[in-house]
Image (cartoon, rainbow, N blue to C red):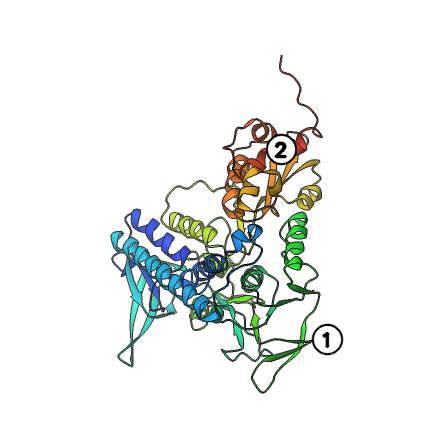
Amino acid sequence: MTDFDYELVIIGGGPAGRRAAIQASKLGKSVAIVDDQKNIGGVSVHTGTLPSKTIRESVLSVTGWRDQYFKSGRQRDGAAATQSAISSRLSTTLGDEVEVIDSQLSRNNITTLNGRAKFVNPHKLSVTQSVQSKRISFTVTAEKFLISVGTKPFRPKHIPFNGTTILDSDAIAAKMPMPKSIIIVGGGVIGLEYATIFSTLEIPVTVVEARENILEFIDRDIIANFSHQLTERGISLRLGRSIDKISLDKECHPNVQLDDGRQLRADMLLFTAGRVGAVDGLGLDKIGIKPDNRGRLSVNPKTLQTTQPHIYAAGDIIGFPSLASTSMEQGRLAACHAFNHPIQSSKHSFPLGIYSIPEIASIGLSEDDARAKGLQVEIGLARFQETSRGHILGNCKGLLKCIFDLQDRKLLGVHIVGEGATELIHIGQAVLNLNGGIDYLSDTVFNFPTLAEAYKVAALDAYNRMPQPRMRA
């Protein structure tokens, strides 16, 4: 250890990097985080997860969307008032989060080095800072490294980004404009989250997606329900279509020509079709690590080691699932492995959450996945309109779907669309990971009235179609 400045140096202060740093510090190791942003937190805090979710909550608040079922017409603030409300909430939320992160790192004696990191050799980094308009560099050595630099928006050359009317997802989070209409290219998680946010503001939205389906990793019944809700709200889905050409009119508004010859026009275009690893200038060629064509790094999935055993990678930079929650766990596991701390590799399923309006959440196998594995399954469905809480909240369009194994009656998967889905999913997570099943859910007493009752409704829906268990002697 005496030959190195630190036992672990982490490049990138996002969820994976922070969790790894705290874990290593608790193991008694000397740790530093190198981050080139003004404030620690990474994309998750500054341009991705927290900003988009904060914008979402602000929009739900100012529009009264959650109360729409009980209103014949909504009182709407002007665009300027809406932007002001969003900006105020963003400033407060992100400021508070940075304070919490700084406090956590300080309490755990973690050094933070502001600057751009570049590998000089497998155990040395050059860190470049800008100080009073001057660039200064110094070197840092470490026994082990974690690369958690995250990703940035994919910006293909044929898209004429201009920062005002043609934006990527980082820029939209920073500005949250109020266009009169918007085209969103990309029907993935980010694109659909923003599509539903703008639609809730009663801004006409067209989504262009090259694939034939949206969110192909989500159960099809949930997507059918979600797509129907989008269509009801006037969101236009152009699936199986790609962009041939984008031109700007004299006011810099985009005119889009699709591959089928159709023309789309709007005040603004948001491009969300993919992200790439933020590895530019990291000096990976100096250490024999080669990213793929999207800048992502390959790791041993059990240890998070790259091709250099003392260099780890975690978070969005290693690809799917690219969630803040899983990134944190990857960072923790990498730190534990790096310093030989015994860990039990978790085989539990983790939940997916999509903060569209309405939310989508999922855990375990989808119906198609279960059948592809040759499993015999029974399906239980619960519509939120079947719960008293759903009527109280005006949240009647939601759907909860449970998938049960016919043989052992265990829960295989839960899939939800509707407000509160990302909270409700954790009940299914606990039951699934603790090997519970239909009998537990059908016999359990839930608080009344709650949306959680939907689990019992779904279990009872499937119960009568399930083979009855043999009576014990």
Residue 356 falls left or right of residue 244 = left
Q: Is residue 23 left or right of residue 259?
A: left
* Mark 1, residue position: 262
* Residue 369 seen: yes
Classify mark 1: helix, strand or loop: loop
Q: Which residue is mark 2?
A: 459
Mark 1 residue crowding within 10 angstroms, few (<14) / some (14–19) / many (20+): few
Tell me which residue sits at (58%, 55%) in the image. 72
| The C terminus - image quarter | top right
Three-letter amino acid code at disc 2?
Ala
Count every numbered label the image shows and give the total: 2
In terms of depth relative to the viewer, which is nearer, 327 or 141? 327
Q: Position of residue 272 (x, y in %)?
A: 56, 67
In the rendered view, tell whether residue 333 sits above or below residue 74: above
Residue 183 percent location from the top left of the image:
61, 71
Query: Depth check: 446 or 434 in front?
Result: 446
Q: What amino acid is found at the position of numbered circle 1 in the picture?
A: Arg
* Residue at figure coordinates x 68%, y 52% from the top left: 224
- Alpha-carbon neighbours of circle 2 within 10 Å: few (<14), some, or many (≥20)? many
Asked which secondary structure carries label 2, the reply is helix
Residue farthest to the bottom, as pictured:
250
Point out the residue furthest to the right here: 260
Near-viewer residue (102 or 395): 395
Q: Quadrant of the N terminus?
A: bottom left
Can I make out residue 310 in this image? no
Residue 83 in percent (x, y) is at 44, 68
Q: Earlier in the sequence, mark 1 or mark 2?
A: 1
Looking at the image, which residue sits at the far front?
Answer: 72
Picture layout, residue 13 above or below residue 372: below
* Nearer-the-camera pick, 313 or 51: 51
Can you give x and y, in whole percent of width and height, for residue 438 in the image? 61, 31
